[in-house]
Amino acid sequence: MKKNYYIVSSILLLSLMMISGCTGKDDKDNIASISVNPDSEYTNTFKKLNLGELYDFDFKLNDADKTWVNVWLERYKDGKKEPQPLAKLSYGNSPNKVEKGNLGFGMINTNDSRLGFLYAPHVTAPPQNIDKIHSDNIFTGWDYAVGEDKMALKLGETYVLGAYRESDGNSIRTYNLQDENEVKKMISDDKIVFLLKMKIEKK
C-alpha cells in the first residue's frame, strides 16, 4: 500500500511540474500577485484519490527573467522554531519575461507517515517526511493568509501564505495571519505549526 502511495505521488508531482501554467489577469505594475485556488484541478484530484491535503494558489510573476523566488515551510513545535525549514524551493532567472501557474504545499498521507512537498510553476521540491502524530486528541486545521482576490507582492518582502496547525483538544481557533502578533500567539498556543512563506528577490 505504501509503495502505491509513492507511485501515485510521483506521478502527481511530475504532472504539477508539467502543467502548472494556467493563466490569469493581473496588474502589470506589480512584481507578482497571488490568490487562493481552492477548487483547482490539483486540489480536486487529491480529494478524489484521498491522498491527503493540497493547498493551491494562482501565482503570477512579472520580470521573471530578473527575479528569484523562494518558498519555504517553517516548522514550530511547542512554540519553538526548528533550525531548518521542513521544505524549501528556490527558482528564478526564467527565459520568459512573465511566469504564471500553480504554487502551493501538499501533504500525502500513508498508513504510518506523511510526505510534505512544495511546488511552483515548472518546478517541484522532493517530498519530505513529516512526523505523524498518533493521537485521537489532536485537532488539525489550515488557514490561508491570502484570499481568492489577488494580493500584490512586493520585491524583497517576506509573506506568510498560510499555516497548517495541530492543537490538543477538539477545537482550534482562527488567527489573522497578516498580523504579526496574531501569528506569534498562534505559534505559542498550538502544539505544531507549519508556516508557508514566500520572498521574491532581484538576481
Image (tube, rainbow, N blue to C red):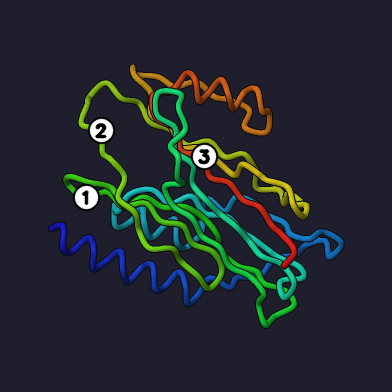
Disc 2/disc 3 C-alpha distance (Å): 18 Å
Query: Which is in the foreground here, disc 2 or disc 1?
Result: 2
**What amino acid is at disc 3?**
Leu
Q: Nearer the viewer, residue 201 or 154?
A: 201
Residue at image position (53%, 73%) is 122
**What amino acid is at disc 2?**
Ile
Q: Which mark is residue 195?
A: 3
**What amino acid is at disc 1?**
Thr
Quadrant holding the N terminus: bottom left
Query: Which is in the foreground here, disc 3 or disc 1?
Result: 3
Q: Residue 38 location, x and y as percent?
A: 53, 50
Quadrant holding the C terminus: bottom right
Q: Residues within 10 Å of mark 2 (few under 14, many from 20)?
A: few
Would you identify the image quadrant in which residue 162 lies?
Answer: top right
Disc 3/disc 1 C-alpha distance (Å): 22 Å
Return the residue at label 1: 110
Q: Nearer the viewer, residue 66 or 111?
A: 66
**Of callouts 3 and 1, which one flags the residue occurring earlier in the amino acid sequence?**
1
Q: Residues within 10 Å of mark 1 (few under 14, many from 20)?
A: some
Q: Residue furthest left?
A: 1
Asked if marks 2 and 1 touch (Cβ < 8 Å), the reply is no
Q: Which mark is residue 133?
A: 2
Q: Residue furthest right?
A: 29
Q: Residue 143 location, x and y as percent?
A: 53, 35
Q: Residue 15 location, x and y as percent?
A: 41, 73
Left or right: residue 145 versus residue 196 is right
In the figure, 21 relative to 25: above or below?
below
Q: Nearer the viewer, residue 139 or 77?
A: 77
Q: Residues within 10 Å of mark 3 (few under 14, many from 20)?
A: many
Q: Residue 76 location, x and y as percent?
A: 44, 32
Would you identify the image quadrant in which residue 84 lies?
Answer: top left
Q: Secondary structure at mark 3?
A: strand
